[in-house]
Structures are given as structure tokens and as C-alpha cells.
Image (cartoon, helix red, strand yellow):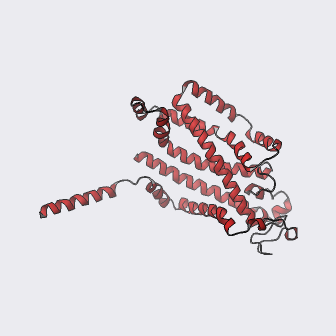
Amino acid sequence: MENNKVDIIQTTEEIVSEEKSLPPMGFEVIKREFMKDKLALFALIILVGIFVVAVCAPFFMDLDKLTRVDIFNRYTAPGQGGYILGSDEGGRDILALLVVGTRNSVFIGVCITIFSIIIGVALGIISGYYGGVIDDILMRIVDFIMVLPVIMIIIVVVTIVHKFTIWTLIWVLTAFSWSGITRLFRTATLSEASKDYIAASKTMGTPDWKIMFFGLLPNLSSLFITNFILNFAGNIGVETGLSFLGFGLPVGTPSLGTLIGYASSPDIIENKKWVWLPAALLVLVMMLCINYIGQALGRAADSKRRLG
């Protein structure tokens, strides 16, 4: 009886030790990467904080009142007249404009990234998986879109469209941003589709759509995550640049680009830095945070793929 108890205890200890020795999986891999990379963890905290403030600010601030034109308080310096970051030419609170502008820029960047990733990944996997005529047709379309002067076309569209909204800008940018993603995932799929597990799935009679999106796509997770993060940063940059040039969001709609666009004269650049500098610094911080987070997520995805 005592021997049986000893055997049970030893078996239990062996199971526990085996569980402890197992490599981390899923969320644990991502958590481990962020705990190892303190800079990426710090970047994640800052980025989440920026997003939370941008989303939750309307519940604590009267943004309509703060962004109302008040010419009697134009170019008020920071800390004066109740303005924490000062006011712009119209007497509007720079802090409130920064919050609204961040929310608009992030919303546009997320939407463009999601739509372009969905289109680009789907077409890229289909093109690389089937090859042949389908691949030729899709790649010729991609080649045509990639040689177009995208910025010039966007500027023309913005100029000729009368009722230009945030969604118009999102759809226009999405229409030209999926082609590079398609080419990237098509190349990765060509390499992945030649492996044994794809051939085994075909032999077992698994439908092609299930092989592509439930068998092949998970093995491209590191590429997917890294591409998503970098495209998100790039799309925010494109929107900011277009708004800075005056061809982005409609007039009167704040964004980080329109705030940076206030730096249009030597007097403002030199003597009224509070009008444009906070937005420029915020864009820089967001780009750096997204870059560090993307690197950590890419390493985590690579680890999961090796373990899987």
C-alpha cells in the first residue's frame, strides 16, 4: 500500500516537472518576449495609454467647447488663460485638438490597415497557392497598381470629389495600399505551398480554402503580424503627410497632419512652437512605439512557429 502511494507521488511529480519543462505556448510566448524586451513593454504601455486617452477623452472633456473658435484667445501661450498646451490661430485648445486629431489619425490608420491586409493577404495566398493563369492575372494587376503615381492620384481624387469625408480618404488609400502586401504574401505562399503538409492535406481531400486559410496562413503568422504593425505605422504616416500638405482630411477636421501643417510660416515655426510641436512629437513617439512592438510580436510569432 505504501509502495503504491510512493509510486503515485513519483508519477505526479514527474507529470508536474514535465509540464514545467514544456516550452511556453500561445499568449505565454508573447508575454515572455515583452518581459524580456523592456523597451518593447514600455512602448506598449505608452501606445496603449495614447489610444486610451484618445478614445476616452470625450467622456471627460467637452471637446466641442474646447475646439470652438475664440479669436480673442488666439495664439495663447501654454499655461495661460486655462490652456495647458496653448491655443492656435482660432483660439482653439491645442490639447483638445491633439486628442481629436490622434483619434482621427489612428482610426484612419487602423481601417486602412485592416482593409488592405484582408485584401492583400487573401489575393496573395490565392495567387501563390494556385499559380498558373490566376497568378499571372493577379500579378499583372499588382504590377499595374504599383507603378501608378499613387500620391498624385490621391491628390487629384481629393481635389475633384466634392463631398470628401474620412471614409472617402480611407477607401482611396486602401485602393492602392494592398498591392505590395499581395506580392509579399504571394512569394511566401509559393515557398510554403511546396511543403509536405500541404501535399498531405490535398491528398486527404481537404478543401483548398481550408488549406489556404487554416493550414497555410497560420504558418505565415510572423509575416502577417510584422506586416500589420508596419503598415499601420505607414498608413498613419501617409495620412499625416497628406493632411500636412492640405490633401488629407476635410477642412475643419483635426488630425495630427493638420496640426503639424500649422508650421507654415517662419514666425509660427520659431515663435509659436506649441501650435505644431506637440503633434510632431506625438507622431514620432507613436512611430517608435509601433516599431518596437512590431519587432517583439514578430519574434513571438517566430517562436510559436518553431515550437509548433
Q: Is residue 93 visible?
A: no
Query: Residue farthest to the top?
Result: 133
Point out residue 164 in the picture as x, y percentages from the top left corner: 78, 47
Where, by quadrant of the figure, is residue 308 drawn? top left
Query: In the figure, is residue 241 to the left or right of 233?
Result: right
Point out residue 142 in the picture as x, y percentages from the top left corner: 65, 33
Where, by quadrant of the figure, is residue 120 drawn? top right
- Above-or-below relation of 113 to 77: above
Query: Residue farthest to the right?
Result: 72
Point out residue 72 in the picture as x, y percentages from the top left corner: 88, 70
Question: Residue at (44%, 49%) from the top-left corner?
Answer: 304
Point out residue 223 in the picture as x, y percentages from the top left corner: 53, 44
- Above-or-below relation of 23 to 216: below
- Towards the viewer: 273 or 150: 150
Q: Is residue 256 visible?
A: yes
Query: In the figure, is residue 71 to the left or right of 43?
Result: right
